[in-house]
Image: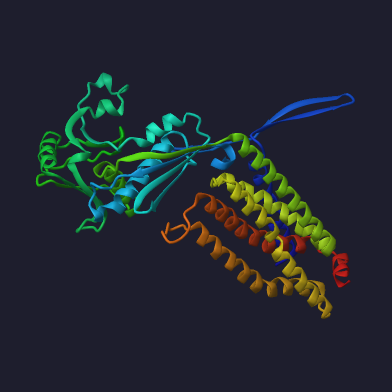
Amino acid sequence: MSRSSHFKTFWIIIGLSLIALVIDLPKSFPINIHWKNINWDYTFNRPSLDFNLGSFHLQKTFDLKYGLDLVGGAELTFEADTSNIAKEDIADSLQSLKDNIERRVNLFGISEANVQLSTENGAHRLKVELPGVENVNQAISLIGQTAQLSFRGEVDLPPEATSTATIYDLFAKDTGLTGKNLVKSSVTFNQNNSEPEVSLTFDSEGSKLFEDATRQLKGKRIAIFLDDFIVSAPTVNDVITGGSAVINGGFDIKTARELSAQLNAGALPVPIKLIRQSTVGATLGQDSINKGVFAGLVGLALVALFMLGNYGALGLLANLALIIYGLLTLAIYKLIPITLTFPGIVGFILSIGMAVDSNILIFERIKEELRAGKPWNTAMELGFGRAWDSIKDANTCTIITALILFNPLNWSFLNSSGMIRGFAVTLLLGIVISIFTGVYVSRNLIRVFTYKKVNNSLKN
């Protein structure tokens, strides 16, 4: 690559770093300058992202989300009563229960809540962590309700009422069908076009009610509500007899499974009772944040001093890459967003030290090439190239370990603790970003800022 290409890449890296810096800044902070005749008071407000394109709306505030151990809140443990559910349906019922609880707490405004299923001594339990929740009794009441499924028919509204009508006004016809009439919902595939569909099977009472509803609503829509929130509104094309129906309409396999799970949450209600409740004070959480941030700054300073003292000018460039690493990592935490727990902070601190491992391997290889009499540019390129195998192998092992701790597929024989997962996800992101900054960013910085004095300092 030519020197102009190196500079082009360099400015791209600087641009990404500046964008990350803006995202990383606090939501607002005052700037006060009073010196001699200069009096300037200004409050900086970090910009947010609010984008509309037709029906698509994207909004980001770029705020860090903190876990239960950092901001306080409630931890609730429920026991599920599966005694009235067939053995082969228990797994699906519990998953539907989990999905329904997650939807409820999200509607409650707790999008970073952690919901986990577990089995202890044959009992099925559901643990719900609610960071920042102040009204714990309201949350308990919301979570403890059994899912309510209902089917409502579309009605003809007068023209003057359509502009102010709500979804409940539009679907005001009570069909009498509820979740107790739905035996099961499952994903099937259309025999003609192989597209995913959602099949419904009703009991004998539900079959009669559904037949009557489809006869009265032919050509109109029948809405399916779960906890008074609409999940689907298919059009009735024909009178349906026999107690079986199919919902179609351009589903992919993911949306079909989601709808089936939502229907089963009402069709297979799992009663739950609260067996344990604990709270975490916000004061303890803030103390953990302060200590974690201080430890991170101390670790960053010690690593920077080591690199500067051991590698001179190259160490200075490695420190610059480390700063870029920190900016990018924090920005990604906010963009995803990552729910930051104290173990997550530990994972971030650990990844700071590991972020310079790549540079150490590379710089030592460059030293060896220079001592062998290679020109600076050749030694630098060979150092990066020959160190890559070691960097790749070492980081691959750490990535595999982090994935095992994170357990993305929710395997029952692996960890499912939210705290350990918080550590795993920050460590995993840290490793991936450190490979980028340690190899790509550092290499570009060295190419741009290569001076003869760097060559001379490494030979010593």
* Extreme residue toward the front, this view: 121
State whether residue 176 is above or below residue 37.
below
* Extreme residue toward the top, this view: 160
Q: Is residue 347 left or right of residue 447?
A: left
Q: How is the image coloured?
A: rainbow
Q: Residue 95, position in %: x, y?
A: 34, 49
Q: Residue 270, position in %: x, y?
A: 29, 43
- Residue that appears at 69% across and 44% down: 291
Quadrant in the picture for the C terminus: bottom right
- Residue that appears at 38% across and 41% down: 101
Q: Residue 278, position in %: x, y?
A: 49, 38
Can residue 65 be seen at all in this image of the molecule? yes
Q: Is residue 223 left or right of residue 10?
A: left
- Residue that appears at 43% across and 58% down: 409
Residue 121 appears in which quarter of the rendering?
Answer: bottom left
Residue 34 appears in which quarter of the rendering?
Answer: top right
Quadrant in the picture for the N terminus: bottom right
Judging depth in this view, the residue of 246 and 141 nearest the camera is 141
- Residue that appears at 25% across and 54% down: 87
Residue 434 appears in which quarter of the rendering?
Answer: bottom right
Judging depth in this view, the residue of 18 and 253 nearest the camera is 253
Can residue 12 be seen at all in this image of the molecule? no
Q: Residue 56, position in %: x, y?
A: 44, 39
Judging depth in this view, the residue of 13 and 153 nearest the camera is 153
Judging depth in this view, the residue of 321 and 148 nearest the camera is 148
